[in-house]
């Protein structure tokens, strides 16, 4: 589907929302294509980090494609199906076994904001704008999406964005901790590439372990898989990469990790 693109550069997989004429608003078909791309990235051991971004230079993702609402959310049954489907996609991205980076240039609104929240790291350009316009469209916003937003920026900041439906700029987003760094537009891609490359050079088993445990820390205590956390830690210490890390440190060289 040409409205969702992907490419691989080194150890980085790029997932690109390609609907610039609608500011990368996302239809159900695009979410389905996103799922297929994630299947590819998850099964490819050479990919160690995933970058999500938008085409066209004007938007990351501006939310749901309102022109598709009548078809995709025009009845109670259709709305229920739509909400169930996109919840699974958001949850998959939030729990994706490999680190994810949102590269935000331009508008990041509604569902786009929720998508960015699901990513592990958020880096934006100086022209980025963030907002949650649901209150202006009479849309309901589900529990898990609100929970993730509150986890990311705290209850009061999340309530301010939701209740006012106001847009904030890149500096404000950094101030409240929504993004980890801000760059001029012409330096954004280079900065994200540098971060992704750095992650890709680190020990994959350790990064996966820390990603999984991070998701467990933020999950309901009654549903945490602490045994899996312990096993992943043990697997790190039993790996060939652990030996390589120690050897490289003693030899004062850059380690070459294989994920084994």
Image: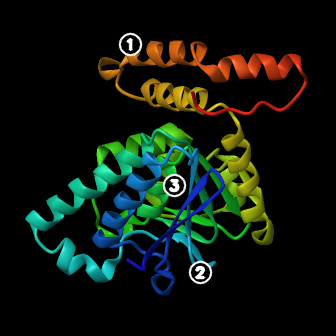
Mark pair 1, 2: CA separation = 44 Å
Is residue 220 among the parts visible in the rendering?
Answer: yes
Q: Earlier in the sequence, mark 3 or mark 1?
A: 3
- Can you give x and y, in whole percent of width and height, for residue 78 in the image? 13, 67
- On the rendered structure, is 13 left or right of 220? right
Q: Is residue 146 above or below residue 186?
A: above
Circle 1 SS class: helix
Can you name the residue that lies furthest to the bottom here? 21
Vertical position of residue 6 compared to residue 148: above or below: below
Q: Which residue position is annotated with label 3?
A: 116
Residue 25 coordinates in the image, percent (x, y)? 42, 75
User: Label 3 to label 2, Cα distance in Å?
Assistant: 18 Å
x, y percent for residue 254: 83, 32
Circle 1 residue: 227
Q: How is the image coloured?
A: rainbow
Query: Can you say whether 37 is above or below 175 in the image?
Result: below
Q: In this figure, which residue is indicated by the disc labeled 2?
A: 56
Q: Residue at (47%, 41%) from the top-left corner?
A: 150
Residue at 48 percent across and 19 percent down: it is 232
Locate the N terminus by quadrant. Answer: bottom left
| Front label number (1 vs 2) | 1
Determine whether 115 is above or below 237 in the image: below
Q: Which mark is residue 159?
A: none
Element type at mark 2: loop
């Amino acid at each position: 589907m040409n409205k969702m693109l992907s490419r691989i550069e080194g150890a980085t997989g790029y997932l690109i929302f390609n609907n610039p004429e609608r500011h990368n608003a996302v239809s159900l078909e695009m979410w389905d294509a996103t799922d297929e791309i994630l299947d590819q990235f998850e099964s490819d051991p050479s990919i160690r980090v995933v970058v999500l971004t938008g085409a066209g230079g004007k938007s990351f993702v501006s939310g749901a494609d309102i022109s598709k609402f009548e078809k995709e959310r025009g009845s109670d049954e259709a709305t229920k199906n739509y909400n169930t489907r996109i919840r699974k996609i958001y949850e998959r991205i939030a729990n994706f076994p490999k680190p994810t980076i949102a590269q935000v240039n331009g508008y990041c609104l509604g569902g786009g904001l929720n998508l960015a929240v699901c990513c592990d790291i958020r880096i934006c350009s100086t022209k980025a704008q963030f907002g949650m316009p649901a209150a202006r469209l009479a849309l309901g916003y589900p529990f898990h999406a609100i929970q993730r937003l509150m986890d990311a920026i705290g209850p009061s900041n999340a309530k301010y964005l939701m209740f006012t439906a106001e847009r904030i700029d890149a500096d404000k987003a950094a101030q409240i901790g929504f993004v980890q760094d801000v760059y001029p537009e012409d330096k954004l891609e280079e900065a994200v590439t540098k971060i992704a490359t750095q992650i890709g050079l680190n020990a994959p088993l350790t990064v996966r372990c820390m990603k999984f445990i991070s998701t467990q820390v933020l999950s309901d205590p009654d549903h945490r898989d602490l045994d899996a956390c312990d096993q992943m830690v043990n697997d790190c210490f039993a790996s060939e990469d652990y030996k390589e890390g120690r050897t490289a440190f003693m030899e004062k060289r850059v380690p070459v990790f294989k994920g084994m």
